[in-house]
Image (tube, grey):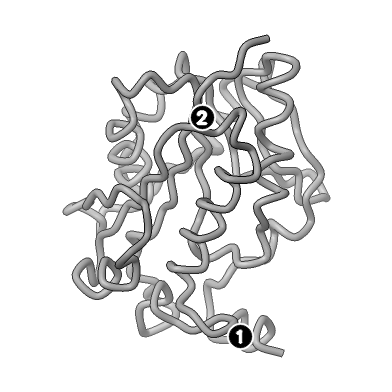
Amino acid sequence: MAAVDVAIIVLAAGQARRMARLKQLMPYRGKSLVRHAAETAIEAARLCANVIQGPVVVVVGAGAPEVTAELQGLPVTIVENQKWSDGMGGSIARGTKAVIGRDVGAAVLMLCDQPLVTPQVIRDVVRPYRMESWGVVACDYGGGNVGPPVLFAAKYWPDLEQLSGAEGAKKVITKYAHDAEYVPCPAAAVDVDTPGDYESLSR
């Protein structure tokens, strides 16, 4: 099968109310979480250069100027979701719209608060799409839980564009379960939603 361009969309627009500060800017291994996520996406694109040749898009919202400053010098496209306070659904829709029309056959959604996700994880998510033509490829966290990073072929983007409010990608994963493959990835289950999560990560 010929290589098909795959975009990566990094979702970094939320306010993280439970953190009482912008978690996108919180330090992790000497850099902010958002820069770490963006660099992970860029390295994944390099690692999978024969497949991932599409853009790396970062969706910002809360604290947009400060978050954007953290991405200075990186080869990413930054788009703003001005309605970020409505929930993640709008950020997914905004990121999806940003890759339409770029000759991209699929897009991987990843979160900026999953710091244990590596470029290899993204490569593993892309592989079933690339090699076996699965339309949806999600991470399996174990215990029946699935989620990002998750790939959606372009034919499912209209569903992503319709997301709003607190709706996440899981709604679309479930809808197209017949065309979904799952990649074991316990590390993707680690996210930073609360001060306790961040403390555990720092340890």
**Crowd class of label 2 (few under 14; some 14 to 19; many from 20; radius 10 Å):** many
Q: Position of residue 86 (x, y in %)?
A: 26, 53
The kind of residue on which mark 1 rests is Gly
Specify the quadrant of the image occupied by residue 92: top left
Residue 78: percent from left, percent from top: 27, 52
Report which quarter residue 157 is drawn in: top left
Q: Is residue 53 above or below residue 192?
A: above
Q: Earlier in the sequence, mark 2 or mark 1?
A: 2
Residue 140 at x, y percent in the picture = 76, 44
Question: Which residue occupies the extreme top position in the image?
Answer: 1
Q: Identify the residue at horizontal 81%, vertical 44% (top origin).
A: 184
Q: Is label 2 in a helix, a strand or a loop?
A: strand
Most foreground residue, 108 or 54: 54
**Going 37% across and 75% down the picture, which residue do you hit?**
17
Residue at the image point whose x is 68% and y is 14% from the top: 133
Which residue matches tag 1?
Answer: 196
Instruction: Report the front residue among 132 and 1.
Output: 1
Left or right for 139, reference 172: right
Question: What residue did someone put label 2 on?
Answer: 6
Q: Position of residue 77 (x, y in %)?
A: 30, 47
Give the number of the disc on residue 55: none
Kindly report which numbered mark, 2 or 1, lies closer to the viewer in this rendering.
2
